[in-house]
Amino acid sequence: GRSSSVFLSGAPVVRPHGQLHADKADPTKGSVFGTCQELDFELEMAFFVGGPPTAPGSTITMQQAEERIFGLVVMNDWSARDIQKRE
C-alpha cells in the first residue's frame, strides 16, 4: 500500500504491489493482491523547513514560515491510485 521513498533522478520506477478490487464494477467480490495498474505522477514543489518546534495544533505567522524555509526542490510524486482506493 502506502510508502514514502525518495530516489535520485534516473532510478527505475518499480510499480508497487498491494490490495486491488477483484472486480472494479462489483466491489463486493473482494480483493486480490497484485501490481498497481493505475500509477500516476505529479510534479510538485517541496520545501525544506526548520526552526524551533511548534506545539501540536499551534500556528505560526506567514513571516515565521518564510524564515523557516531553507531550501526548495522539484519533486515527482508517484501514486498508486488503485491501491489507495483500498486503504
Image (cartoon, rainbow, N blue to C red):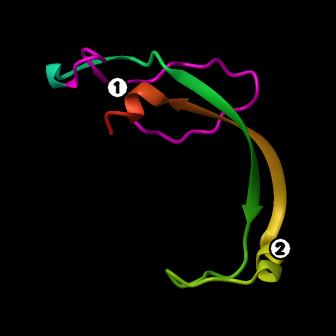
User: Please, is residue 26 above or below residue 6 in the view?
Assistant: above
SS label for mark 1: strand
Q: Which is nearer the N-term, disc 2 or disc 1? A: 1
SS label for mark 2: helix
Q: Quadrant of residue 1?
A: top left
Q: Residues within 10 Å of mark 2 (few under 14, many from 20)?
A: few
| Cα distance in 3D space between marks 2 and 1 | 39 Å
In the image, is 6 to the left or to the right of 48? Answer: left
Query: Is residue 26 found inside the magenta-colored segment of the image?
Result: yes
Residue at 83% in and 73% down = 66
Residue at 46% in and 15% down = 37
The residue that disc 1 covers is: 18
Residue type, numbered disc 1 = Gly
In the image, is 1 to the left or to the right of 64? Answer: left
Query: Is residue 80 found inside the magenta-colored segment of the image?
Result: no
Q: Is 24 or 3 nearer to us in this picture?
A: 24
Q: Quadrant of residue 78?
A: top right
The residue that disc 2 covers is: 66
What quarter of the picture does the C terminus occupy?
top left
Magenta span dominant secondary structure: loop
Please provide percent x and percent y for residue 2: 43, 39
Q: Residues within 10 Å of mark 1 (few under 14, many from 20)?
A: some
In the image, is 33 to the left or to the right of 6? Answer: left
Contact between labelled residues 1 and 2, with CB atoms less than 8 Å apart = no
Please provide percent x and percent y for residue 47: 76, 57
Residue type, numbered disc 2 = Glu
Question: From which residue to which does the magenta span run?
Answer: 1-27
